[in-house]
Image (cartoon, rainbow, N blue to C red):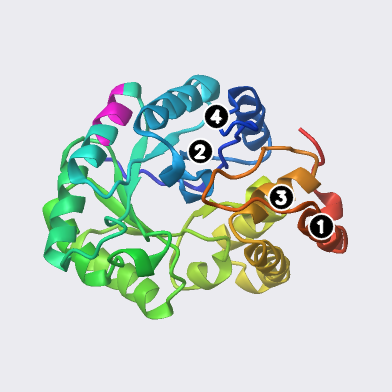
Amino acid sequence: MTTFKPGLVHSPVTPFKADHSIDYETYAKLIEFHLHNGAEAIAAPMPAGEDMSLKDDEQGVLLDFVLKQVKGRVPVIAHVSDAGTTIAIERAKHAEKQGVAAIVSHPPYFWHPKASMVVEHLAQIGNATKLPYFLCSPPVEDVGTPLTVEITLDVIDRVPTLQGVVDSTMDFVIMVETVSLGATKRPGFQLIPGTDYMVTAGAIGAMGVFSQLAAVAPKLVRQVYDLCTQQKFVEARAGQEDLAELAHCLKLAGLAGLKGAQRAMGRECGRPRPPARALSDAEQSKLAASLQGMKFLQAEPRGW
């Protein structure tokens, strides 16, 4: 199989209306924003897209919508994770039928199966299609079994289409072992940052990125990404530090922080679905003021 290198992947949020239904009109504008601001691929619906809040039928409709909106301009990567193996397999098969470029999945969540069961789960998903396959870190490790290096190596042995790991742990040992040991089993095996901290991961051999912050600061994300692909990690540090400041600010605001930041930048995407809590008016004002104080955001696009 030809190696699929995702490159700079944007992971968009899922816009919701006041009644919590998906706002497809806004979603179309959001996808166009990402396409016109540096996305080399689109991954949906990732945790930033509140995938666990989407109903089964919504998952398929949303993916179909993304593919139709993108119209082949960049690859679309389908996130097919679920706590149930059969459900995840059906999502993977649907994604393949609809024409995605690759699939990505993390271990089951909200229960703690043994490592051998996780390997079986991930292997069955990967072998259900002929698509390039990537593993990814679960969004919250304490509500499920974490993705260990040992699990990854076992899945490599079971799934010929497995091409890499999208890592959000930022655990240096895990990243180094994934790069080195993964490549011994499968030449070209990829480590891809699942956060916007590209410099640290790139310095040990990672490539590409699944970016959430590109929804707020796409120019800065592109700048850091380009420097890292050129292995100019020292030059990329200043931009990485700016991204770290932005990431920390949004983290303090919780799941609603990313949508709140987009609202502050003139790109309203609604509030998150319950049980995630939306920002209060006071919290939104405080977040907007914090963003206003970040001089590097002055160069970023406002509005759609």
Disc 2/disc 1 C-alpha distance (Å): 33 Å
One can see residue 216 in this view: no
Place of residue 73 in the rendered image (x, y in percent of width and height, measured from the top left): 53, 26
Which numbered circle lies on residue 42? 2
Q: Residue at x 55, y 29 (%)?
A: 22
* Marks 3 and 4, the one that precedes in the sequence: 4
Which numbered circle lies on residue 21? 4
Packing grade of label 2 (10 A; few <14, some 14-19, many >=20) is many
Q: Nearer the viewer, mark 2 or mark 1?
A: 1
Element class at badge 4: loop
* Marks 2 and 1, the one that precedes in the sequence: 2
Per the image, is 59 magenta? no
Q: Nearer the viewer, residue 237 or 247?
A: 247
One can see residue 153 in this view: yes
Q: Which residue position holds label 3?
A: 260
The amino acid type found where label 3 is placed reads Gly
* Marks 3 and 1, the one that precedes in the sequence: 3
Packing grade of label 1 (10 A; few <14, some 14-19, many >=20) is few
Q: Where the N terminus falls, by quadrant?
A: top left
The amino acid type found where label 1 is placed reads Ala
